[in-house]
Image (spheres, rainbow, N blue to C red):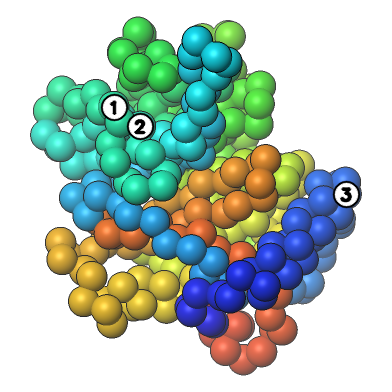
Amino acid sequence: MSRRKLSPVRARASILVWTAFLLIGSCQHCPAQSTEQLPDFYGYEVVAEYAHDPYAFTQGLQFDNICERTGGGSACKEVFWESTGMYGESTMRAVQVADGRVLAKTPMASQWFGEGATRLGDKLYQITWLSGAGFIYSVPDLKQVGTFTTPLNDGWGLTTDGNLLVASDGSEQLFWLDPANGFKIVRQMRVMDGSKPVFALNELEFIGGEVWANVWQTNCIARICPETGKVKGWLLMHGLRQSLQDRNLASNGMDVLNGIAWDHHRQRLFITGKYWPRIFEVVPVPVNATDDALAKRQSCFVRK
């Protein structure tokens, strides 16, 4: 899989192809898929790199535009909402996309291990590891304005379809939670690639009508049909972490791939990991189901 930065001309061409793919995919319902049918496979091209705090144990990542009124109109900033983990180090933060500067940060009490987070309406929701507890923050100042409890015993990833929260708990299940109804589970779905369950679903993002999920301890991102739970495709991100190590940028002992953010206005996909010193803007590139792709696919299945 290519890891080099593209020329401006080739980058624009790749983005146009990717944008067309998303537009076509968003207009289609998930097709029926037999257990023998292979999912699609994708490599990646790196379009750009952005600075990232190498001491951030990234658990949740979401792109957003924050616009504030000024005397002459409004000023907007591109930010990542980032939830970080580890006991005594967990935070909810706003990070400027352009330079990685932390614009706002709210530390969590030491008994909490931050996990996935997402914005829904004018609030940010954050869940916690080994717990059903969650926290609510105001936008954009990240003041904690409330707490909530889910029926889940463990919190891993969190995203939204625009109406409900979608959570993972480290299993092969996705859960749709209703904030307007006590965060009750209104829907639950098992994620399968053919006849195989996909365990360890971690950080989540809703992209083009699909749920995209990091699979913990792998270089794999699953494209999941929210109607059926079937894996439509795999993004094989192998080599991305190694590219940082090859440039001696792994100053804080980088951990696993974890962090997906989507700019739906400009069709940009951002990828990072725990303790990674960079956030990558990438374009997925379709690849054939070669022996190499099939072997990488096998690495996407984590034992329960």
- Residue neighbourhood size for the residue with mark 3, other residues' Cα within 10 Å, grouped as few (<14), some (14–19), many (≥20): few
* Numbered label attached to residue 28: 3
The CA span between labels 1 and 2 is: 5 Å
Q: Answer with mark 1 or mark 2, whichever residue precedes in sequence.
A: 2
Looking at numbered disc 1 in the image, what kind of residue is underneath it? Ala
Please name which of the two marks, 3 or 2, marks the residue nearer to the observer: 2
From this view, report whether residue 204 is shown above or below residue 152.
below
Quadrant containing the N terminus in the rendered view: bottom right
Q: Answer with mark 3 or mark 2, whichever residue precedes in sequence.
A: 3
Q: Position of residue 279 (x, y in %)?
A: 40, 56
* Numbered label attached to residue 104: 1
The CA span between labels 3 and 1 is: 39 Å
Please name which of the two marks, 3 or 1, marks the residue nearer to the observer: 1
Residue at 43% across / 38% down in the picture? 80
Q: Which residue is mark 2?
A: 94
Tell which of 10 and 170 is nearer to you. Answer: 10
Question: Label 2 near label 1: C-beta < 8 Å?
Answer: yes
Residue at 42% across / 78% down in the picture? 239
Q: Is residue 289 visible in the rendered structure shown here?
A: yes
Q: Is residue 4 left or right of residue 142?
A: right
Residue at 48% across / 78% down in the picture? 3
Looking at numbered disc 3 in the image, what kind of residue is underneath it? Gln
